[in-house]
Amino acid sequence: MAKLLDQVNRPEDLRRLSVEQLKVLAEEIRELITQSVSRTGGHLASNLGMVELSIALHYVFDFQTDRLLWDVGHQCYAHKIITGRKDRFAKLRSRDGISGFPNPAESDYDVFTVGHAGTSIATALGMALGAQSNNSSEKIVAVVGDASIVNGLSFEALNNLGLVKRQMLIVLNDNSMAIDVTQGALAKFFSKVRLSHTYDDLRRTTNTILEHLPVIGRPMEGALENFKKAVRMAISPSRLFESLNIPYFGPVDGHDIGSLIKLFKGMSNLEWPGILHVYTRKGKGYTPADDNPRKYHSTGPFEINGAASTKKGRRTYTEAFAEALVETAEADSRIVAITAAMSDGTGLARFREKFPDRFYDVGIAESAAVDTAAGLAKQGFKPVVCIYSTFLQRSFDQIFQEVALQNLPIVFCIDRGGLVGDDGATHHGLMDIGFLRMLPNMVLISPASEYEIKEALAFAAASSSPVAIRYPRDTVPNGQIEAATSGKPFELAKSVTIRQGRDPVVIAALGSILSEALLAAEQLADKNIDITVVNARFAKPVDPALIDMVRRGSHLITVEDHGIAAGFGSAVLEAAAATALQQDPTAARGSIITLGGPDHFIDADSRPAQLNEIGISAEKIAAVVEKLTAAINNQALQNSR
Amino acid sequence: MAKLLDQVNRPEDLRRLSVEQLKVLAEEIRELITQSVSRTGGHLASNLGMVELSIALHYVFDFQTDRLLWDVGHQCYAHKIITGRKDRFAKLRSRDGISGFPNPAESDYDVFTVGHAGTSIATALGMALGAQSNNSSEKIVAVVGDASIVNGLSFEALNNLGLVKRQMLIVLNDNSMAIDVTQGALAKFFSKVRLSHTYDDLRRTTNTILEHLPVIGRPMEGALENFKKAVRMAISPSRLFESLNIPYFGPVDGHDIGSLIKLFKGMSNLEWPGILHVYTRKGKGYTPADDNPRKYHSTGPFEINGAASTKKGRRTYTEAFAEALVETAEADSRIVAITAAMSDGTGLARFREKFPDRFYDVGIAESAAVDTAAGLAKQGFKPVVCIYSTFLQRSFDQIFQEVALQNLPIVFCIDRGGLVGDDGATHHGLMDIGFLRMLPNMVLISPASEYEIKEALAFAAASSSPVAIRYPRDTVPNGQIEAATSGKPFELAKSVTIRQGRDPVVIAALGSILSEALLAAEQLADKNIDITVVNARFAKPVDPALIDMVRRGSHLITVEDHGIAAGFGSAVLEAAAATALQQDPTAARGSIITLGGPDHFIDADSRPAQLNEIGISAEKIAAVVEKLTAAINNQALQNSR
């Protein structure tokens, strides 16, 4: 059967369809999203809720010249389908397909590559100010979710909207559920507003706005005041936005394409910034996702008619951590857990169930999460802060001042440390070692197995200083490596030799990448190259034993799932230089080679492919060892001549 | 004449004085602050405004068990004088005296060492949650200024206050002026409230609150509602706080000790969080500061009966930058400037006067400042973002995602890069190279003279990628060094040899510390040690010529006014390791020694003393060269045997 979607290859094609046809199109797009995500994995529920809104936006605005800014950006699938990427949509989140987030390299319709929360209003503010200075007429539209608008960055931008004296539309997509249930006063306020409105109220509000819109396009102060008065009678006044002097419209029904088109048409002519508050339903149209939007927020491949599939096989580092934390907390009542809207993603849901009184979720507010932890630590608690590596970048200054400078015993459990696979460049955790190891008092460890997750947590919980534990978005290693890494509790700045070789080559692997290093060692053994493999465990402080090996002539290769710049290998180089200065700076030593992430961004792909791309797969590690061994042999030959 | 202050050695001494005596005491404290700061320099205006508030807080609360949290913390002088530090107050901001910010190492009355904005509510939130869990009865009080409360971190914490089901008092110290005039909607809102109240209104508000306070200590829902209704009639309702469901009281007069004592007594018994909005006058009691609080925000030593003294002598890097920026902007109309409440501190005031339409101040909102710049860059502008190094830590994630990932041509002018002297540990800029050089697309330069400031800016303005320029809180170098660094425009990744020596020792100095390196070279020449000195210019990318010198057997010493961890020297080590891997990893090479900041925090002191402390003064550099030279000679001797 011919589909309307077949006729839609670019946004202008929408304008040839009637509202009734657009409704059908919405269902077709919903079906395409569900079908594709069931195969590729991705963000499902939020995208199902955004279909009508995306259609209406593209129907009214021309985002080749107008600018559409997404927040977090995981809800852009319908937008991608409409803007000429429907054929590539089957390859969502793969290297040769399209990204799961907006990406200007893919399409001019994407303005910023995003993935973090709170940026859309802030960047839209800058773009509106730019348009104001240019005196250009393009419309600026920022879409932000009710979970993202509570982020401090959103608030800072809202507080500066008064600088904008021209059109700038903020669409507040209120889908009543962030990744976790949104926390905080603003969420409660939204929910109160939400509960106070029936479907008929939404329709009445829409009509009231529409009736008055023709008037307010004109730059007449009086007209605006009249409009505000009229609307205030019909709608729930948003005191927050009013106190910030931002005109607020809504709430309206985000699945009523016809009304949305009229609203956007009217509001596109406003000559000042405004917020349109829109209700949408996560998971709309796909029953399992509608019933359980949290489960279908970000999903792997699943069976459309069944439950979300859970991959069989080894458990993830996240799952291992979740269990270990509950065990540790059972033994130590001072332990409390803090997250920033990520209790499912970080595995904290289990802790929350078990210890609801010792669990704090501050919403998408990574900065405040760390300061809340600092306050709790000052009160004698042992806070465990669980935030993805990439989002912890939002807390850098708080970790510096409120944690490291005070030397507070806070444990940072950094999930998604390293390459994350299909979420791509915005989500990799390739800088946490770099920004954390600059902080005095900070200890950085990375476990290489399930056993080590438990021991790392035990070590951190016993520390009187801040400790960060990083682990990847990956499964724990096989039984052989699990066994090889077991039995030795963590001791400060102590690495563990896992494999002792005869050749003067030592690999020091940090964290889960140890498994690739051991695999490389096995492959090399077949070629009669017999190397030593050390499980580094500590990125800070660096084990002096590693430096000593170099002093005694061994060649050291550091391997880390982190950027080379400022990473673990960099710390080893610094330690070696410092030791050399103290001893004899000119003495001959073994060389140090650092393997890790390069100085460019890494696109979405499978995690194994990415590990190979940046040169830390077993094969790539082995190739470096072979090159090094050839150089060593060559030198020995020259010396013997 | 005997002073009341002589009888006040600890907070409990206040309680022996009458309100009339406390008023006299306030004047005495004001005099001590003015006298001391005129000799030591420091924050004057804000502290003069805080005297009565500090007395009343310590009169009512017992901050040995109750907890007082400061925001930014520069307004804590009266607090320090009251809490047993009046005798050391003459040595404010010196190594053997006391810090200009709260510091737990000095006194149990200081809870957190702070210096950045927005932390007091966030850490108080954590402490209140901790007290709630502990079921302990200490009172938690956060003091926050009207400039800090607009920070995203403050908002994130306010949004989570609903977690607190016990007492927690936020004192909003509204002194109507941040360091610069506070920007944004909230500031406008406060100012509207402010203008709508006469002095009599403040008194009436105070009375209304006091009349109802006995009632609201009780945990009765109805009583609270009645109270809110009663108060709402008399005071200007704060819609913002109400929409966040935070009980709001005020505004009241912050110089009326008697009323403040009654208000704090009443509010200390509240069983939920609340905000008391207090008006104070910056500079109160010292006419020049009262008339010109901006000038006296943070001042060097001055003559009490005259104007603030301006140190004669060479201009600062900040002044040189201010002039260079105006010149560059005259030639390039795409240049716009953005700051976060620091137009005076960063030297942007001059740009603002000249180009008011191309200047944006977003208030203390470093994260939004960077995103605003990102939006402006997308619109074809060339934004110059001016933020102190330590505060730029707040923007790390925005620079990562919204700037580096998009590869936007934004110029970061990082003032206070390096050791800052008397502001101490919270204010040093010792990490900017580390966190910025991890970002792909980013270029990092550091000028060593006034000429180089101009050239660095010209280079950055011409770049199509983000460029960061860092310079210290210091004066530009003398004429000799100015001449030695002049004449050569910046070329990407190109260092400049300033002094060519005969010995195989090369110092690569980054930025203004070049002057110490050249001084060291002169001192060494007297000892017949003849070294080469290179002006590195680029921290990223590292000049390959430096690595080549090492390959050819030279010993390289990097010197930077930045932490060794992840800094410029670290980047050189990485580059050398990468080059070695590409060429021959086992080949003999010169050594690399990295000099810079250590792995501990550096206290307040003079900047020269701090440079010496961390080992990058001319003397300390020379000593390292001597040690290295001895090792080289010793090795040559052994080789010749």
Image (tube, coloured by chain):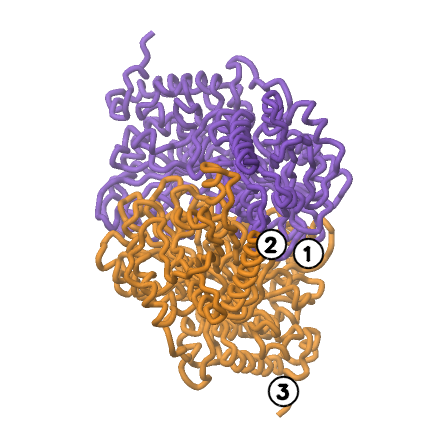
Chain colours: A purple, B orange
Give the labeled residue for mark 2. A584
Q: Quadrant of the C terminus of chain A?
A: top right
Q: Position of residue A536 (x, y in %)?
A: 64, 38
Give the labeled residue for mark 3. B3
Q: Quadrant of the N terminus of chain A?
A: top left
Q: Is residue B474 above or below residue B273?
A: below
Amino acid type of the residue that numbered disc 2 sits on in the rendered structure: Asp
Instruction: Decide which of B114, B568 is in the foreground and name it.
Output: B568
For marks 1 and 3 on the same chain, the one whose residue lies earlier in the sequence: 3
Q: Is residue B92 above or below residue A606?
A: below
Instruction: Decide which of A332, A363 is in the foreground and name it.
Output: A332
Q: Residues within 10 Å of mark 1 (few under 14, many from 20)?
A: few
Q: Position of residue B119 (x, y in %)?
A: 55, 56
The residue tagged with tag 2: helix, strand or loop?
Answer: loop
The answer to whether marks 2 and 3 sit on the same chain is no
Q: Are marks 1 and 2 in contact (CB under 8 Å)?
A: no
Residue B496 is drawn in which quadrant?
bottom left
Give the labeled residue for mark 1. B218
x 38%, y 68%: residue: B476
Tag in front: 2 or 3: 2
Can see residue A239?
A: no
Amino acid type of the residue that numbered disc 1 sits on in the rendered structure: Arg
The answer to whether marks 1 and 3 sit on the same chain is yes
x 58%, y 33%: residue: A472
Q: Residues within 10 Å of mark 2 (few under 14, many from 20)?
A: some
